[in-house]
Structures are given as structure tokens and as C-alpha cells.
Image (cartoon, coloured by chain):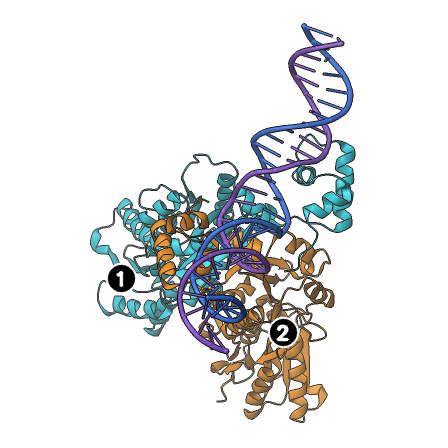
Chain colours: A orange, B cyan, C purple, D blue
Amino acid sequence: MQRGATLKDVAKLAGVSVATVSRVINGHANVSAETRASVERAILKLNYSPNTIARSLVTGRTGVISLIIVQEDPIVPTTWFYELPIVQSIYDYLKGQDWELQIAMCSYREFQEPAFLPRHFNKRTVDGVLILSAWMVERHIVSELKERNIPHVIIGAHDPDYESLCIEYDNEGAIRSLVEHLWNSGHQIFGLIGGAPNQLHMHGRIQGFASALEEFGLPTWNRLTKYGDWSIESGYELMQEFLAREPNPTAVVCGNDYIAVGAMRAITEQGLRIPEDIAVVGFDDTVVSQIISPTLTTVRLPLAQAGRLAAERLVRELDKPSPDNRRVVLPCEIVIRDSSKSS
Amino acid sequence: MQRGATLKDVAKLAGVSVATVSRVINGHANVSAETRASVERAILKLNYSPNTIARSLVTGRTGVISLIIVQEDPIVPTTWFYELPIVQSIYDYLKGQDWELQIAMCSYREFQEPAFLPRHFNKRTVDGVLILSAWMVERHIVSELKERNIPHVIIGAHDPDYESLCIEYDNEGAIRSLVEHLWNSGHQIFGLIGGAPNQLHMHGRIQGFASALEEFGLPTWNRLTKYGDWSIESGYELMQEFLAREPNPTAVVCGNDYIAVGAMRAITEQGLRIPEDIAVVGFDDTVVSQIISPTLTTVRLPLAQAGRLAAERLVRELDKPSPDNRRVVLPCEIVIRDSSKSS
DNA sequence: TTTTGTTAAGTAAGCGCTTTCATGGAGGTG
DNA sequence: CACCTCCATGAAAGCGCTTACTTAACAAAA
């Protein structure tokens, strides 16, 4: 870092005091037009720009927001598809509002450790925090944040008491739409192949699955469920299990697109056709859903919208702390493709 | 941000001067063991941690590194697969070294504007910069950085004069291996479907393609090339053009996996078989290469390695500025799958 | 004994800014 | 003309830290 001109230099050149220069810079009233003009001339001449650090020391604000990306443990590269669109939209918004973005990544285990936040804020000096997590944000984390008086917004999850601002996806509604779509095509026996159920996403999807089938009056024995992880392999294996014993589901709802790809593989290997014999739907609308054959019906999460909204809310909270309505649940869009089209 | 205990508080509690406390914190010599112990006790008792901002103001260092992610204009979501692994590996390394990571994203057009860097460093106070770009980093950017005395490393590209530290991929070597592999399977007529040739990646791949074919003694008319963008659609259309007129290539090298997917679609639509009639290879080893049928031969870029290496070098430079060897070219691994297997 | 060196600790300046308080002049009022 | 108000400006404190300089104590050398 090179040191440029300071307030003092500008003041000297403009023939005024540093206080006046500071007033001009911060747009305060009570500065005469001529003084302002001469100060501005001096600023231009010296190519002056204020030292953010010094300013922060006085004001106690840094203009930096921290984004904590909470990840699987160990990290699963396929979750990356999910994270960058959110980062992008957060950044895009923050850029327009003149906030800086600092990022941190950690596993959900690390994140849960009581020592995590103290360590995190030890060195870091930020005004607010965005938490991108697929897991419940534990109570002690919210307390810690409150205690330190750091505004925060949770993206994709919530805390047990819904105390924090949070932006979530309507997983239940999405699953419900999916089930409705399949129901309308005449399906009666539904299978669910889930990913790790400790993730909140999955939790909502499981709930939605059960309640939708209930709503349609399906007997309990017609709702088959299996849980693995989020991989192609897991989908493949669990689908094989479904196929190994009666009753076979005629429609399979998968926790994400990768699981669906695995399931489709298992189905076609058995010589069964998709969607004629078994319909398959996924979740997340990743690029694979358009490439796989048949193309995969799936759910598009409003990732960019979530990121932007979270950033917006945090900035609003930072500008003037106010009790805001706490929870936002964003609707998801179902994307119908060939893997579930009724013939 | 909540204000906690200060140096002064610690000094008072320990019955010493602030200077002594500062010496203890920074591990300076000339502090007696008892004094140190009592200061440390006071620190613990007050749960004190130094104010990074105040420290930065004095030392002129912030402990923050900025990562500038330079993107297509408009943004193409499919490049995200590329960026996050790099961010991840950078972060992982920096975390261990106690550096913070601030990120910025911009289009390559914005990045090239003379006003970009001044504006960027206006507010931002960072010690070093990592530039993730697929385009040549222009001379004036390097000068600006030099002038401001900000160490930097370029990832995935370079500047015209190779003045900056940079980490690149051996695109030429990768293409050469690919061509060699196809040559060994008996192919004689090669097609290349490229993405935007203004990207340095593509540049290296084009070069490598030409020189490899030269090396194998192929006549010029047997090297067919077409350029579009990086999308499935582009690959599809350009492949159709290849198929529309003689001579048809028997092996097609694509600029990335998406282009390859499009090309494969065009080929199978014509009733031709892959790889029997035409072999196809891609680039980037994205998840689609494993999902498409037949599975796609492709090239795996050492993304994580590049990110880590870049971070390492920057930190080393920051710790003790030293003329380092300037350029690193990382080898890529070719991943042979079904789309190019000789029968 | 006096001088010099060494070490532990303190004093105080200052990093570049914001902000409170003080000041003085211009203008308005009775 | 005395008084008050209002406004533009300046002086100076202080945000929390590092560090050059100083001091004091004590030991070793002369």
C-alpha cells in the first residue's frame, strides 16, 4: 500500500482546516460554496482519496460485510453450483451500495464450534454477516452475534427460534407442485430418494412430500422413502433397492438432480423406460438436467433472488436498525421436462 | 461492532504501560517473564483482542488480500464451475496463513477501463491482489499496480510482457496430448470447435492444435477450425456446419465440454456414431462429461492447484518482497472416456 | 569509585480521520 | 446602537494501536 495525500495536505493546499475538508468530503451542510469549490479543486489536484482505515477507526464502521459459506464436511464439489450464483448476486448488489464483501468458508462442523465466531471476529472487522448454510443455525451462534451486536441474515436456513432474519426456499411448496404434477399424470405409488436429511433443504422436502401425498389421499404404504447422500451413486443404489422389491414406485422424486441421474441409470439398466414405466424428477435445475436423456423435470431455486434479497435486507438493517419482518420464504419454479411427461 | 477492552485497559489491569502490553502481544523481546505472564493474565481476564483497524492504521498493513474475478460480459453461468474451486483453494490456503479474503467480480470490459483500479483501491485497503482472468491482463493494469506498490498474482492468464507473477495452465500441452491420443487411434482429419478466441485459454488451445498437427505431419487442409462461443448451442451449430460439407472430420476437438455436448448432439442426430464414426473430445472435465452418453474424453485443469499456488506466491511476496521466477505453467491431465475410445 | 553497557519498562508522538466545542463576523430585531 | 441569532470555520481531542526515544536499574569493566 502506497500512502497518498492526506486530509492535511488537502487542507493546506486549499488554505482551510482539516475539519472543513472533512465536512466537504462527507457532504455536511454549513460549508460555503466557494470553500467547497476550492477544497474540491485541491482534492482533484492531489488525487486525494480518504483513508478508509483511519475513517473506520473513528467511526467504528468498516463498510465490509462478511459472507460465511457453510459447507458439507468433507466438501462435495457438486454443491458449488449452488454457491456461486448466490455469491454473484450478493456481490452485484453490494457493489452498487458501496459495500465490500469478505468471504469465509467452513464446514458446518467448524461453524457449530463455540470457538468459531470468536475466532472469526477476532481479526475480522465487519459491520454485518451473511450466513449461507443448509443447516440449522444453532442458538448459540445467534446469541453470540446478538451479543456482539452484529446484524446478520441467514440464507437457505434459519435458527431454531426464527429470531434472525432469514431467506429460505419454499421446498415444501415445490415438492407439492411436483407431486401434484405427477398425480395429475395418474401416478399412485411415489418414491422419494433423499440426500442427507440433516440438511434443512431435505427436511422441508420430506415434509412437503408427506403432506402433499396426504392431501391427495394416498395411503401411507404408497409413500416409499430412502435416504443416502447427494451423489449419483447414492441415487443409483437406492433406486436399485426400490426396484428389487414390490411395490415399485411409478414416480420417483429425488432430492437433487444428481440423485435423479443415478436413479435414471438404475431404471434404464433394468430395461424400464422413463417416463413411460417410471417417472423421475429432480431438484436444483443444474446443467445436468438439460443434458441427461430424457431431460429431467426439476425445481429451480431462486438463488440469485435469495442472495440479493439477503444482501438488501442486511444493508437496510445496517443503515437503520429496525425490527423487520423476520422470515422470507421464496417460491420455487418447477421445470417440466421429458422425464415426467405423461405420454 | 461492539467495542471491547483496549490496550489501555489491559495495561491498567496488569499495572504496566501500553507499550509493554503491545510488546507482549507482538512477541517482542525484552519483556521479563513475570511481566509477560501478568499481561497475559490480564488479556485473558478481559477477553481482550487487538483492534485490527487501529493496528492497520499504524502499520499500513491490513492482512487482507483481494481476489478480482474477471468474467465474461454478459456473465455466462457455466463459467462458475471454474471459479469456485479456485476460490475454495485460495481461501483454504489463506485461512491457514491468517489472511483475510475480499472478493470483487467484474466483466473483462470493466476491468480494462483505466478507471477501474483507481476506483477499486479507492475504498479498498488490501495488501495484495489475486487476479482470476481468462483474458490478457493489460499493460496499464500492471503499471497501476506497480505504481501503487501492490503485489499481485495472475491466475489463468498473463500480461503482455510477462512482468507479473502468473499461474497458467498448459493448454498447448493438453491439446497436444489429446491430438496424440486421437492420432494413435488412426484419425487423420481433425476439426476444432473453439469458444471465444479472445480468451487466452482458447488462444493456447488453438496454438497447440496447430502445432501438434504440424508435428504429426498433417496437411493443412486436414485441420478444420470454427469458432463460436462456449455454449451447447454453438457446438451444435458449428458441428452441423462441419457435417454439411466434405471433408468431414473424424475427430473433433472442442473448446470445452459444453461445446462437445452440442457437437455430439449434432453428430448423433445425423445418425452417426460416437466414437466409431466421429470421435469427440472436450475440455474442462465438468460434471457433464461423466453424465453424457457416451462419456466424454476431456482435459482436467489443475484448478485447485492453481489457486493454492497463486495464494502461496502472493503471501510469500507479501512476507518478503523478492524477485521470484515469474511464470508457472501447470500441466493438465487428459481424461480418456468413451467418446474417443478406439474400437 | 566512576564509567559504560545492557536490559526492562515507560513516555509520548503520531497513523489519518471525525466531531465537539469555541469563535468571530454577518445579518436581523427592537 | 445594543443585543441576539445564525452560519462558516477553526482548534483540538481522541479512535486504539506501534514504536522511537528516554529513563532507570543494575552489572560489568576500568
Corner quadrant of residue A227: bottom right
Badge 2 density bin: few <14, some 14–19, many ≥20, Cα 10 Å: many
Pick the front one: A228 or A38: A38
Q: Chain of mark 1?
A: B
Task: Look at discs 2 and 1 and give the one toward the viewer.
Answer: 2
Label 1 element class: strand
Residue B312 visible, this orientation = yes
Mark 2 = which residue?
A165
Label 2 element class: strand
- Residue A139: % across, % down: 73, 68
Location of the C terminus of chain B (image quadrant): bottom left
Residue found 52% across the figure and 76% down from its top: A302
Q: Amino acid at mark 1?
A: Lys
Q: Which mark is residue B101?
A: none
- Residue A171: % across, % down: 60, 79
Q: Chain of mark 2?
A: A
Q: Which mark is residue B226?
A: 1
Q: Amino acid at mark 2?
A: Leu
Are discs 2 and 1 both within one chain? Answer: no
| Inter-mark Cα distance, 2 to 1 | 51 Å
